[in-house]
Image: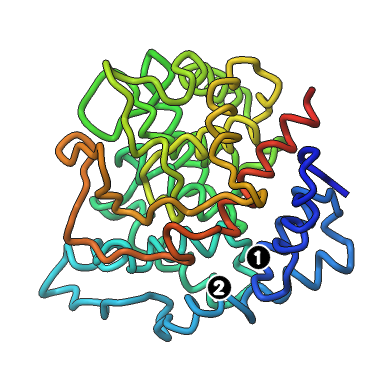
Amino acid sequence: MYISSSKISDQNVIDWLLEENQPSVRYHALVDILDHRENDPEVREAHSKIPEIGWAKEILSLQKPGGYWELRKPSWRKDILGWIEFLYRPKFVATNWRALVLADLGLTAKDERIKKIADLFFGYKLSLGSSFNFFTEEACIVGNTARLLTRFGYSDDYRVKKLYARLLEDQKEDGGWNCFSSDRGTLDNWEPLAAYAALCKQKRTRKIEQSIAKGVEFYLQRKLFEEGKSKYTPWFRFHYPNHYYYDVLIGLDLLTNLGYADDKRLGPALKILKEKRQSDGRWLLDRVHPDLGPGVVESAFGVDKKVKPFALEQAGKPSKWITLTALRVLKRVEDAS
């Protein structure tokens, strides 16, 4: 049994994560915190319940028969661009954003409803014959798409491999990526590393491993939160879903997952993580995106007030997903020491 510190409340926190009302959290806690194997009957049962109980069930219940959410597919002849945009608008409740969450929760294309989502991306976003495909897009979009399709089970598809090739091509000289026009990377563009983290190690090419090393070094040199003259306050608040926004917990989760949990330069970010832990051993969901709280620079980070916020949990309250992620980070660090 994994206990992250000497706190008496730790076992209560683990028990809270293992509650059956959110089988996605239970599944990930069993595998990532308690080291149960995927073929363990308890793990298999929890995974089978993900689409039947809790967050995933709620999301899937709103899915249209065609596999999408929110908007009907527009007429091809009347609105060519509409075919491209209907997966994305409105933020953050259209198909792309809900698909990212379902991928995080642990669903794959073995579920026919997930396969329908993947087919939409392959048909309208990853068609080689379309001038509106993703293969020359910004790294944030490419990274998110590569991550969700990899988690859905399509890492061997030639079109997904082409997305990873785009991430390699778009990496800046300093090791980072940037969704805006710049020759320098930014901590805010974390999606390529997230896509790499979704790939099992056996499927990472030498070029991808080299790209990971450069990308991780970019974050470590900046302590996961230092960019510019002053600290960007929202990066120190924890969020979920993240969509394409960054915070310190994202950085810690990525770097420890990619095999750098033993790097001493994680120390300042880990200190922030530990200080944000509540007296009962849990962590809060600080904000739901778009985070318009104190310290936000709208013009610099593309905050859009017109989006429709999408949340699994209530901001300001203890969060199972944030707590799961935080304990996952601390366990990797402990195991690597």
In front of the other: 14 or 216: 14
At label 2, the amino acid type is: Ala
Query: Which residue in the structure is indicated by mark 1?
Result: 24
Q: Considering only vertical position in the picture, is 67 above or below 241? A: below
Q: Which residue is mark 2?
A: 56
Q: Residue 248's spot in the image, x, y percent? A: 47, 34
Specify which label sits upstream in the sequence, 1 or 2.
Answer: 1
**Residue at image coords 67%, 38%:** 203
Nearest the viewer among 241 and 101 is 241
**Nearer-the-camera pick, 91 or 192:** 91
Query: Front-most of 247 and 172?
Result: 247
Tag 2, which secondary structure?
helix
Q: Are marks 1 and 2 in contact (CB under 8 Å)?
A: yes
Name the residue at 13% across, 74% down: 77
- As drawn, 294 above or below 56: above
Q: Residue at x 43, y 42 (%)?
A: 143
1 relative position to 81: left or right: right
Q: Position of residue 130 (x, y in %)?
A: 27, 55
Would you call the spot at circle 2 few (<14 residues within 10 Å), some (14-19), or many (20 or more)? many
Q: Mark 1: which amino acid?
A: Ser
